[in-house]
Image (tube, rainbow, N blue to C red):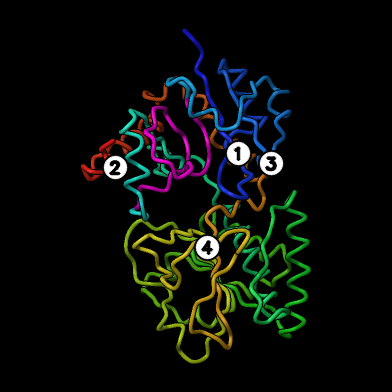
Amino acid sequence: MAPTVLHLRSEDKPLEHRSALTPTTTKALIDAGYVVNVEKSPVRIFDDEEFSAVGATLVPTGSWRDAPKEHIIIGLKELPEETFPLKHVHVQFAHCYKGQSGWETVLARFPRGGGTLLDLEFLQDPATGRRVAAFGYQAGFSGSALAVKNWAWQLTHPGEPLPGVESYPNEDALIADVKKDLEAGQAKAGRPPRVIVIGALGRCGRGAVDLCLKAGLPTEQILKWDLAETAKGGPFREIVESDIFVNCIYLSSKIPHFVDLDSLKEPGRQLSVVCDVSADTTNPYNPVPIYTVATTFNNPTVPVEGLDNPPLSVISIDHLPSLLPRESSESFSNDLLPYLLKLNDWQNDPVWAGAYKLFQEKVATLPKEALEN
């Protein structure tokens, strides 16, 4: 039987340097009998030569479009906004299962071309219901880093938005940068910030808390909230009275808002930075309905209009782990590897089959006009 061919595409999202496959996991797949084609990429954190050195075949950027139908296309973030039907099996994050804006157009491309979406966000262990691989820890860590940097920037550069940021070569470099900014901010404020992390017991929340501790914030300055603390329903005064709010919850159903514009207008507000790590800007269940646009590494913050003394800005970047692309790629790809090794018979593997069942269920909800070529 011919070997299964995996095709790693180059990412198109601006400043997305992560990779679903690394040279390490690519070697493991090749050793297991897979053929791995890797698109040359000007943005990937790993050099093309790192892949060819372990036996991958380098192919032109964007060549996945013309790859044979039986090749499995692997990526991370969503495809470019094009409309042609998709014929392949695609393994990626597509962000079209939770009612996001334009979800019908994104999802319909797969059934229109006879293709399949196996969404990485919904790869779950059927025994536990937990995701088998996620960027949660790195997302929380990176989001918390930018939130602390923004708090300090507001104090040292009043009236100026936080400048664009670029990825860091490693975690140590990021922590050193945040420590320097935190010291400058504390010198201006005369005190450290108070940070509230909601979802603190999950992977994302642990990352957010760890960044604060590694940057030098005292434990008593970090409020670690999870289900027990939010059970009574918001809005929560404790958020408004903190300097920084990092939202780390994964939400799929409606709950009372954690904070809203009315609660932000109450006297005594200290809050000046919100980092919504989930960044589900168009999710109708968003518990932080104080902004409507996703931010980017080039423009990391968006102001909440009508609020000053102090001003309030929101960070809502939907690929925060790319701030630490090498470490986050290695961690995610290593967690995913046991399941990647089963792609040669994915229909009969319970994890991939579960993702396929969900794909079919979501396709069944598409309006008829979305399926017309």
Query: For this rendering, which residue is in front, 66 or 245?
Result: 66
Local packing at callout 3 (Cα closer than 10 Å; few below 14, some 14-19, many 20+) is many
Where does the C terminus fall, quadrant-wise?
top left
**Residue position marked by numbered label 1 in the rendering:** 19
User: Sequence order check: which comes first, mark 3 or mark 4?
Assistant: 3
Spatial CA span between label 1 and label 4: 21 Å
Q: Is residue 238 above or below residue 95?
A: below
Left or right of 137 in this view: 349: left
x and y percentages locating residue 128 in the rendered image: 40, 42
User: Sequence order check: which comes first, mark 3 or mark 2?
Assistant: 3
In the rendering, which numbered label is found on residue 316? 4
Question: Which amino acid does the dot numbered 1 rest on?
Answer: Ser
Query: Could you tell me which secondary element the residue under label 3 belongs to?
Result: loop
- Residue at screen point 57% across, 15% down: 33
**CB atoms at circles 2 and 1 under 8 Å apart?**
no
Left or right of 80 in this view: 16: right
In magenta segment, residue 194: no
Local packing at callout 4 (Cα closer than 10 Å; few below 14, some 14-19, many 20+) is many
Question: Which amino acid does the dot numbered 4 rest on?
Answer: Ser
Q: Quadrant of residue 369?
A: top left
In magenta segment, residue 97: yes
**CB atoms at circles 1 and 4 under 8 Å apart?**
no
Spatial CA span between label 3 and label 2: 33 Å
Spatial CA span between label 2 and label 1: 26 Å
In the rendering, which numbered label is found on residue 88? none
**CB atoms at circles 1 and 3 under 8 Å apart?**
yes
Spatial CA span between label 4 and label 2: 26 Å
Local packing at callout 2 (Cα closer than 10 Å; few below 14, some 14-19, many 20+) is some
